[in-house]
Amino acid sequence: MRAPFAATAVAVAGLLSEHKALLNRALPNAPEGYVPTEVDCPTNRPSIRSAAKLSPHESSWLKSRREKTKPALKDFFGHVKIKDFDAAGYIDRTASDSPDLPNIGIAVSGGGYRALMTGAGALHAFDSRTENSTATGQLGGLLQSATYLAGLSGGGWLVGSVYLNNFTTISSLQTTGEGDVWQFENTIFEGPDDDSLQLFDSIDYFKNIEKAVSAKEDAGFNTSITDYWGRALAYQMINATDGGIDYTWSSIAEIEAFKSGDMPLPVLVADGRFPGELAISTNTTVFEFTPWEFGTYDPTIYGFAPLKYVGTKFVGGSIPKDEKCVRGYDNAGFIMGTSSSLFNQAFLKVKDSDSIPSFLKKGLLNILGGIGEDDDDIAVYTPNPFYQYRPESDPNSHQKELDVVDGGEDLQNLPLHPLIQPERHVDVIFAVDASADTTYSWPNGTALIASYERSLNKTGIANGTAFPAIPDANTFVNNGLNAQPTFFGCDSSNQTSATPLIVYLPNSPYTSFGNWSTFEPKYTNSDRDNSIINAHNMVTMGNGTRDADWPTCVGCAILSRSFDRTKTKVPEACTQCFDKYCWDGKTNTTAPAEYAPATVLGGKTSAGSLAGPTAWTGMVAAAVALFALV
Ligand SMILES: *[C@@H]1O[C@H](CO)[C@@H](O)[C@H](O)[C@H]1NC(C)=O
Ligand SMILES: *[C@@H]1O[C@H](CO)[C@@H](O)[C@H](O)[C@H]1NC(C)=O
Ligand SMILES: *[C@@H]1O[C@H](CO)[C@@H](O)[C@H](O)[C@H]1NC(C)=O
Ligand SMILES: *[C@@H]1O[C@H](CO)[C@@H](O)[C@H](O)[C@H]1NC(C)=O
Ligand SMILES: *[C@@H]1O[C@H](CO)[C@@H](O)[C@H](O)[C@H]1NC(C)=O
Ligand SMILES: *[C@@H]1O[C@H](CO)[C@@H](O)[C@H](O)[C@H]1NC(C)=O
Ligand SMILES: *[C@@H]1O[C@H](CO)[C@@H](O)[C@H](O)[C@H]1NC(C)=O
Ligand SMILES: *[C@@H]1O[C@H](CO)[C@@H](O)[C@H](O)[C@H]1NC(C)=O
Ligand SMILES: *[C@@H]1O[C@H](CO)[C@@H](O)[C@H](O)[C@H]1NC(C)=O
Ligand SMILES: *[C@@H]1O[C@H](CO)[C@@H](O)[C@H](O)[C@H]1NC(C)=O
């Protein structure tokens, strides 16, 4: 049970001692809770940097990280064997500062709680700290071997929840009882449990959220629905008093274990949106949040702001002499909320929903209508850090406000953009896709297709990125590319520029159905746990029961690009893997029948039936009703 919201003397005392205990985590470091606050600028005044190179922070961090991924890879190949090839020895012989060392990225798609749970199952399987995960058939240690972990929307909640809770394990997040974090039995519009009546608690919870957002507004900062949303989300994802109100995303860079390279680099993705635009085009600017920076490699802005100082007035890339610095804008919940701000889509749905009571609908439409008129149905970043930074190519450069939306709204529902940047040299991406592309909320490759198509505009938005060839969505279903793991871009000689090899891990039913509706707000602990184990089974192919060679094939995917660079003869076991798992270039574009897979390993538990867009609008309506009460 977490601390009650009422700020009694006891709670305040508890808060202070908790702060002391958490000092070595260095996470709750916002100067004034939720409110962005003026501070003196450091002597070396923060500025916007060009995206031509990696962040100097990232470059120096990578040295520490590679010192850690090398032994982790060696351990991984201690239990994942490649027949007639000494993979552990190959890693051992590769220096940690050599570009030949495999460079791994993991990407977790959007898709609300479905994506969070599917991604959680993948991390559960990849984490060597998970019980038995280094046994035969298992993939434990892949997380420890990875350089990057990217999340978007629901996948971003997962990444945030893991990092903001001191890089905790999935098993510790899904406990039931004392200190439990992922309480999805209460919707985000009810708030976490307290000792007293739920309605009373909810009102208190909403009052707290309202208070924080108004304080930001009163301090002169524009707010949007994302401020409410992000605050609410934080109560579910961050294990600290008052939903971790003083946790910032940039504070992740202060965690000792992060600094010494003990964990991958977390990256969240969000999309840019031009003022007045409701549908997002596929060539919109894609932003990323690392613990150090917020910005984009896209040619529009092609720049990065120091995340810790977002909220400061930058003009043309620097801070005018008379301006002070602002800190605390990058509240961790707000950043997770930004990546998942589906509210303009909810707005479009509510308008034509006839399933919610008319009195609620009227109030709701008033609020949402007002928001729509003000272009406030998004995450508003004012001041725009990129104001007058690149007027020749940024259509938003003259705006004092920067509008940012859910990272999946451009259909690139997998956060691959940060991982295909040439400067990062990623060799292999484990792409965990829990997108709801089909009628029954299964993925059919749409996210990969969007990234592939975007990469084709070589002179425009792609700006130096490349992506392996990806077939159409019908082919995914007809040829079973979404029914088991599939590799794309295996043959690097079939590509004109270097691309990572993509290991596509589509959400599939193994022991239970993890195809929950994106808008399903409520999960019992057993549904949550079944979905997590199902995804563990999905990425390990049932711990190798569906194919005993699968762990070997994962090992081959990791080493493939490194083999090319070192001109190592591909082991026969790997050739067999590539024959089995690489997309063969064939297509079948005829419209398939409705995709309705049965469980691979014969589980029976079906995903909830009452889910649907109405659950979402109902949830928003409930929130509005509660706001009316407080
Ligand atoms: C965070 O995790 C590290 C590594 O497991 C541990 O040493 C440290 O004590 C943890 N810090 C807190 C505040 O729990
Ligand atoms: C781990 O493996 C041991 C031995 O096979 C088994 O008894 C135990 O239940 C396993 N634990 C989990 C969490 O699967
Ligand atoms: C959440 O906080 C409680 C109380 O501080 C602690 O006992 C528990 O281990 C924490 N859980 C995680 C996953 O960090
Ligand atoms: C942002 O705040 C300023 C000053 O309060 C106000 O003039 C402007 O209309 C606000 N913008 C939005 C989108 O609310
Ligand atoms: C995006 O694509 C549209 C055409 O589809 C084009 O009009 C527009 O200029 C493009 N924007 C950018 C930033 O490339
Ligand atoms: C990416 O865009 C920037 C800004 O427009 C440009 O300077 C750079 O040359 C582009 N990079 C590539 C590889 O096209
Ligand atoms: C490619 O990018 C250019 C420059 O941004 C844009 O004008 C053009 O419309 C884009 N082409 C396509 C097919 O989107
Ligand atoms: C695979 O391993 C996990 C973790 O040990 C376990 O929970 C799961 O039941 C196993 N799956 C199968 C199909 O045995
Ligand atoms: C090889 O490259 C061509 C051209 O990009 C593409 O059409 C084809 O699908 C690729 N083949 C495979 C197997 O990726
Ligand atoms: C999940 O998929 C199965 C078929 O694979 C379907 O019968 C079921 O209705 C789906 N559940 C949801 C919530 O879409």
Image: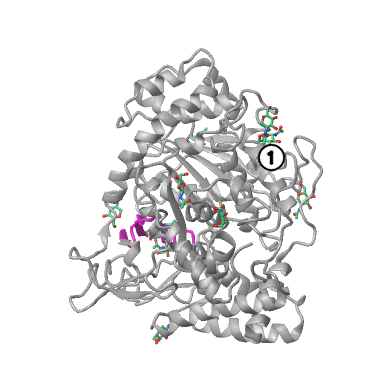
Question: Which residue is at 71% across, 83% downward?
Answer: 360
Does residue 141 appear left or right of residue 20 in this picture? right
For this rendering, which residue is in front, 295 or 456? 295
Asked whether residue 51 is in view, the answer is yes
The residue carrying mark 1 is: 478
Mark 1 Cβ inside 8 Å of ligand 9: no
The location of residue 451, given as percent across then percent down, is: 49, 49
Q: In this view, does 519 lie above or below 151?
A: below
* Secondary element at tag 1: helix
Say if the magenta span includes residue 381.
no
Residue farthest along the right direction in this orientation: 604
Residue type (three-letter) at the residue carrying disc 1: Asn
Say if the magenta span includes residue 294.
yes
The location of residue 179, given as percent across then percent down, is: 61, 56
Asked whether residue 102 is in view, the answer is no
What span is colored magenta in the figure? 281-304
The location of residue 595, given as percent across then percent down, is: 74, 46
Q: In this view, does 257 lie above or below 289?
A: above
